[in-house]
Image: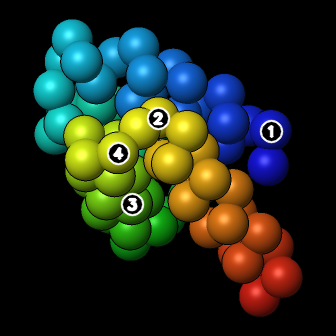
Amino acid sequence: MSAGIGEEITMRGALQPRLGLALTALLFATLHIQYSWYGMAVIFVLGLVLGKIRQRTSTTAAMAVHVIYDIVAILTT
């Protein structure tokens, strides 16, 4: 969970304002290269969603959604 918080501070808080939504989502996906191509595609879409949440609300909201996503992923695997 703490990794997700750090990722959101870095990706959405620091990089997205400079690199834009799509490039930040792509970078976010490449940081998860340990997953399959399908998994990376899902993470790219997640990056787009988290980026939109950050654009419309705040980095804190994106952090909260990321933590919830991680908890659900842990509980369902």
Frontmost of labels 2 and 3 is 2
Circle 3 residues within 10 Å: few <14, some 14–19, many ≥20: some
Instruction: Quickly name the residue at label 4.
Output: 57
Residue type at mark 3: give it.
Leu
Q: Mark 3 and mark 2 in contact (Cβ < 8 Å)?
A: no
Q: Is residue 9 above or below residue 73?
A: above
Foreground mark, 4 or 2, reads 4
Q: Which residue is mark 3?
A: 46
| Secondary structure beneath label 4 | loop
Rounded to the nearest angstrom, the CA distance separating label 2 from label 3 is: 14 Å
* Distance between mark 3 and mark 1 Cα atoms: 17 Å
SS at mark 1? helix
Q: Residues within 10 Å of mark 4 (few under 14, many from 20)?
A: few
Amino acid type, mark 4:
Thr
Q: Which mark is residue 2?
A: 1
Mark 2 / mark 3, whichever is N-terminal: 3
On the image, the x and y values in percent for residue 68 come to: 67, 66
Residue at numbered disc 2:
59
Give the CA separation, mark 1 to mark 2: 14 Å
Name the N-terminal-most of marks 3 and 4.
3
Find numbered disc 2 in the image and state the secondary structure of the residue it sits on.
helix
